[in-house]
Amino acid sequence: MLGRGWRRLTIAMVALAWPACAATPSPDATPALTMPHPVLAAGDMRQHLDLSGVWHYSIDPYRTGDAGFHGGDPGASQRRYADIDVAQQMRDHPSALYEFDMARAPTATLPSSWLTHSPDMRHYQGLVWYQRHFTVDPKPGEREFLRFGAANYRAQIYLNGKRVGEHEGGFTTFAFEVTGLLRKGDNQITVGVDSARAPEDLPPPVTDWETYGGLTRAVTLVTTPATYVDNAWVRLSRDGRIAVSAHLDGKAAGDLPVTFRIPALGLALPGKTDGNGDWSTTVAAPAALKRWSPDSPTLYDVQIAAGDDVWKDRVGFRTIAVRGHDILLNGKPIFLRGIALHEEEFGGNPTRAITPEAARALLSEVKDGLHGNYVRLAHYPHSEVMTRMADKLGLIVWSEIPIYWMVDFKNPEVLAKAQHMLAEEIERDRDRASIIIWSVGNETPITPARNHFLSTLAAEAHSLDDSRLVSAALLVDRGSENGKTVFNINDPLIPSLDVMAVNTYNGWYSEDPLPSLADFVWRSPYDKPLIFSELGAAAKAGFHDPTRSHKFSEEFQADYYKYTLAMASRIPFLRGMSPWVLKDFRSPRRQHPVYQQGWNRKGLVSPTGVRKEAFGVLAGYYAKIAAEGGAAH
């Protein structure tokens, strides 16, 4: 049996209901499932029609296309999703009133954020409607699904004027079946995307990154046979065996013969699903199997044949574990030489459109420029384009959901949203060898409600995926003993985690003289590896200070790295770091008119990729660690 990780829909999903429609559970109740979704694992590799390209858009700041001003359905004059030709209707009926015309609305090329559609939308927050037409010829016996890489933050979808469904969460993939709603020839898709967030949303309204509302990842129309492999997981188990699990969906899903293949290894495993359409098996790894690692990122084409369907993916095989203070990749200790990264492409006016070329440019700067083997994809699940590129290039990945700062930890509906986001994240990327850590939080204040919330998520992550590690970016206690500064890593969440991680900015967000950092003492009562999930200082590229003392100068940032890395080298249980951050990124909270101008300047490179002095400091440190066999001490 595949377990509850394969039945994601049993996880509470109030996250899929719009706030006005959500039921209010009792304080002790788990919010109920409201809407099922297909998983469409590796859906990007299935036969599909890519709906990227030119779409019409219309802003709706008062949400008149969503509801009437007395509540209820919107009036006919505001229904942007209506399957009509507004201009023709007004010609045929001159007295008719329409206060929209999507066919004549401005256009934008998607995927992208509306913040770059036009200068007057740069800081728009709210509801925007997108619409385009496409042509298809549905075949009998086939099923069709609209698959969205991401829609930030809430989305409601209409096909040919009929409501298909809705989704909440700006960074995870979701899909709806539209078999029977498509018509031969012309079809109209309309998507209402609302970027506004409330305190009960994830992340909450206040963050330190750009919102980037819109359809920021590809929309596709995926075609499958009537019975198809909806979910599949191929991996190397902790004992070194190839493990395969699959769930089929369709009338013929039960008791159906299936075959798993790795053509390059000559491996073929036959089997049969159970009555629920589930199948699992393990087999000893062939002697010819090459394990995935940053030094040798070997990937294999894999297949699961079931009836008329052949599910395909490209996966790597490796194991990850911890032993005391060590992180073990394929049974050997590894030090994670990394950097943190936001989902934002190089350029002076990024729009969060991650193409394979954009992903390669970012990750190659880590792999080749910094001599890194690891990247923290913060603070939300990144595009599958990015995680597939990490697989290909050989970069270890920390992936997280946006449990960030002041989450409403006491609200059971918020926990339900987080559980659903976590499930969507894991089920999309569970076949990516590069991902070794699922993170369940970032810089969250310690309270009993928070402890329960995050420990529940950690347990959920372990349940959905027992082949990876779980962590969270934590805060740390600072004290003094015998004149020395001492940091105690003792967060009550740590027993629920496999790896400890802390964010540290001593000397940037504190008055500590940089030379004093090397003498700081780090302790923990837990026998677990530590990652510095963040460390950093800001600098505006090109701003120099001969005294090296001015914050925001390249010299200060470089010296910060020199002294902080010296501190890190003295921590015996440190096993990796992901300094903050690879490149400067948009952040509306950063408004110094000279040094920031709406950008967080902690990047080691500028928005356009110009390397700062500190880049060389970190690259040199990592090159030395790599040359010494991967140990930092």
Image (cartoon, helix red, strand yellow):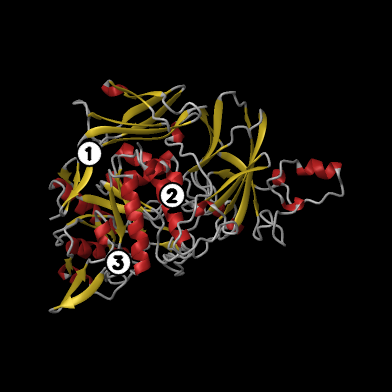
Which residue is found at the position 60% from the left and 26% from the top? Answer: 138
Quadrant position of the C terminus in the picture: bottom left
In the rendered image, residue 186, in percent from the top left (x then y), is placed at 67, 32
In the rendered image, residue 188, in percent from the top left (x then y), is placed at 66, 38
Please name the amino acid that badge 3 sits on: Leu
- Give the residue number, with chain letter if any, for mark 3: 475
Closer to the camera: disc 3 or disc 2? 2
Say if mark 3 contacts mark 2, CB within 8 Å: no
Label 1 crowd bin: few (<14), some (14–19), many (20+), radius 10 Å: few
Helix, strand or loop under label 1: loop
Label 2 crowd bin: few (<14), some (14–19), many (20+), radius 10 Å: some
167 in relation to 263, above or below:
below
615 in relation to 392, above or below:
below
Helix, strand or loop under label 2: loop
- Give the residue number, with chain letter if any, for mark 2: 11
Is residue 445 at all visible to an observer of this figure? no
The residue lying toward the viewer, choosing from 601 and 259, is 259
Q: CA–CA distance between discs 3 and 2?
A: 29 Å
Count of marks placed on residues: 3
Mark linked to residue 93: none
Relative placement, left or right, of 330 versus 436 is left
Q: CA–CA distance between discs 1 and 3?
A: 32 Å
**Snapshot quadrant of residue 139:** top right
- Give the residue number, with chain letter if any, for mark 1: 295
Quadrant position of the N terminus in the picture: top left
